[in-house]
Amino acid sequence: MKPDLFQAPDYYNLDDLLTDEHKLVRESARAWVKREVSPIIEEYAQRAEFPKQIIKGLGEIGGFGPYIPAEYGGAGLDQISYGLIMQEIERGDSGVRSTSSVQSSLVMYPIWKYGNEEQRLKYLPKLATGEFMGCFGLTEPDHGSDPGSMITNFKDMGDHYLLNGAKMWISNAPFADIAVVWAKNEEGRIHGLIVERGMEGFTTPETHNKWSLRASSTGELIFDNVKVPKENLLPNKSGLGAPLGCLDSARYGIAWGAIGAAMDCYDTALRYAKERIQFGKPIGGTQLQQKKLAEMITEITKAQLLTWRLGVLRNEGKATTAQISMAKRNNVDMAIHIAREARQMLGGMGITGEYSIMRHMMNLESVITYEGTHDIHLLITGMDVTGIPAFKS
């Protein structure tokens, strides 16, 4: 394994906008990624296996619910700190960041925001350390971009609920201890339920043969007459807006995370361009390669400014769903283009596991699709600026 020589670009001195706490949080996460993720991640991606031994470390660096208040086991950090942690983790690998994002924004967030005090105290402290791992069940085999059409449902049986249905493309599912599952009641209203591993009729088959997010564990959630205790219903919010609120938090984290992947590809390409000699000089001395590098750092800088401002708005409680959509779409698109350009700069070496670029490129093909596809986020922005939804004919 080559040493991790990553140096983060900061072309516009954006560190001046960060507090000392922000920088400390980021440096802690960066050092952990260099020490614990970079040396092993290529091997685990090649084997299509999630490195479970890093879970404890993810908890220690604040990778699980860093904005959750301290009384529930979180670090009580702000939204920019959360974003910076996601950036550093995805700089290591998008699949590892997916595990962190799901735990933070799709499991801990709804329990914190929509749960009651008993649920918060029961689950959040163990989720914050990684003692419990969770997953989020929204997408179904036939209902992706239109989750409101879900068919997973539960019936009131008097002393419990009876849950039936299936969810697909679920990160963390194969090893999750709990699942926050979204299902319709008998009136067709969407509610969140906490389903625990070991409940009869609840299974989590793993999804194999992925070319993307290979170091992330993906699976299905199958519910066959699962008896769910009534106290496991999240009581404080229902309707489609409840899971979409979770996705706002997760998409915000993705907007930061994608910058990490882009920075890693840029840094790798820049170093290679200075070292690779062709026709008697470094390839970084040619106009075409300088064009690529100049465009990369320009797009990274624009994305950094976008997410910093979005983080300020999130801290102030002012960020809209449409603003978050714009950042998610822009930054992932930016990252995937940088990965492709960086791969070309490395020539044949760019496809090997000796460098991280091809792994990032494959991972980003999932990131550009999950939690709102590239096209759906475009339509969210279009609806926001025109006031006319284009989702339905």
Image (spheres, rainbow, N blue to C red):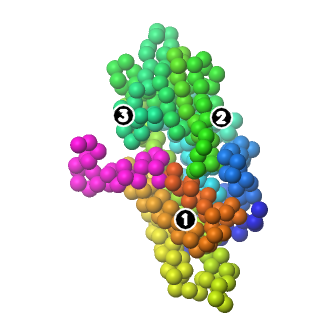
Q: Mark 1 points at which residue?
A: 339
Extent of the magenta region: 368-393
Q: In this view, does 146 lie to the left or right of 173?
A: left
Q: What residue type is labelled 3?
A: Gly
* x and y, in percent, of residue 146 in the image: 36, 38
* x and y, in percent, of residue 32 in the image: 71, 56
- Look at the numbered disc 1 and give the secondary structure of its residue: helix
- Look at the numbered disc 2 and give the secondary structure of its residue: helix
Q: Which amino acid does label 2 sit on?
A: Phe
Q: Which amino acid does label 1 sit on?
A: Ala
21 or 260: nearer the eye? 260
Q: Which mark is residue 97?
A: none
Q: Say whether residue 358 is visible.
A: yes
Distance of label 2 from label 1 (alpha carbons): 30 Å
Q: In this view, does 370 lie to the left or right of 188?
A: right
Q: Residues within 10 Å of mark 1 (few under 14, many from 20)?
A: many
120 or 304: nearer the eye? 304
Query: Height in image: 272 above or below 3?
Result: below
Total label count? 3
Cβ atoms at labels 2 and 3 below 8 Å apart: no
Q: Name the residue under label 3.
A: 148
Taking the view exactly as shown, the residue that stands out farthest to the top is 158
* x and y, in percent, of residue 85 in the image: 60, 55
Q: Name the residue under label 2.
A: 175
In primary-sequence order, the first of circles 2 and 3 is 3
Instruction: Please tell me which residue is depicted at 50% across the width and 10% down the height of the picture.
Output: 159
